[in-house]
Image: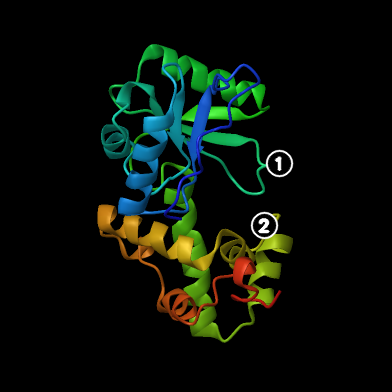
Amino acid sequence: MTEVLEPLPASGDGSQPKTAFVLAGGGSFGAVQVGMLRSLAARAGDDTLLASTTSSLSIERLARESGLPERFFGFHVFNPVNRMKLVELCFPDEAARDTRDRAFVLCETLGKTAVEVPDEPGFVVNRLLFPYIFDAVRLLERSGLEPAQVDDCMKLGASYPMGPLELLDFVGLDVADAIGEALYADTGEDAHRPPGRIKQLVGEGRLGRKSGQGFYRY
């Protein structure tokens, strides 16, 4: 995504409608995310808070680059958003008390449970989750099992609502690869390094559900 939406249309009296929060999707990375945030910040009203849904990029850096560090925070939701209750909130050092309070109120209003997490790649959930789902891919490579067999084991044996390979397809293999690379760059741990099978599928354009094929066909 390289373009930002046009400014909100004016209301009947010609004024801009008040916007309390602006969220930038975490599916864009690096310079693209920074450019998006700068453009959004330039359009933000004096009381508007700016947030990113990323869990792989530094919130401190994004806040600084946005130009509004005192009104910036990380707002990491989980898919499917209508069912998953958790929001990981992450704040830069310069975030104002009002920013922090309003972020928690936003989560409460949305019926979500907010947990403030440290500003490190993956936050809490992805930092713990990705070694598990990457190991499932490595097991697939070693064992010759079918994706459905691995997923059924975890769903029926561990009561997980979705198997690890289904989850990768749902998240998007390109997104999972980028998150894994960010985690590996931070930790140096092989458990966080994306498996070769994921990189192969991404190279073939098989990104999961959004492309119609990943570990499964859709």
Q: Nearer the viewer, residue 186 or 102?
A: 102
- Around disc 1, counting alpha carbons within 10 Å, would you say few (fewer than 14), some (14 to 19), or many (20 or more)? few
Residue 216 falls in which quadrant of the image? bottom right
Report x, y in % for residue 29. 37, 54
The answer to whether residue 10 is above or below residue 30 is above
Query: Where's the C terminus, which quadrant?
Result: bottom right
- Element at badge 1? loop
What residue is rendered at 42% in x and 49% in y? Answer: 127
The answer to whether residue 159 is above or below residue 64 is below
Report x, y in % for residue 48. 46, 22
145 on left or right of 35: right
What residue is rendered at 44% in x and 45% in y? Answer: 54
- Element at badge 2? loop
The residue indicated by pointer 1 is: 82
The residue indicated by pointer 2 is: 158
- Which residue type carries mark 2? Ala
- Around disc 2, counting alpha carbons within 10 Å, would you say few (fewer than 14), some (14 to 19), or many (20 or more)? few
Which residue is at the far right?
A: 156
Q: Earlier in the sequence, mark 2 or mark 1?
A: 1
Does residue 121 show up?
Answer: no
Residue 211 falls in which quadrant of the image? bottom right
- Which residue type carries mark 1? Asn
Q: Nearer the viewer, residue 103 or 83?
A: 103
162 on left or right of 124: right
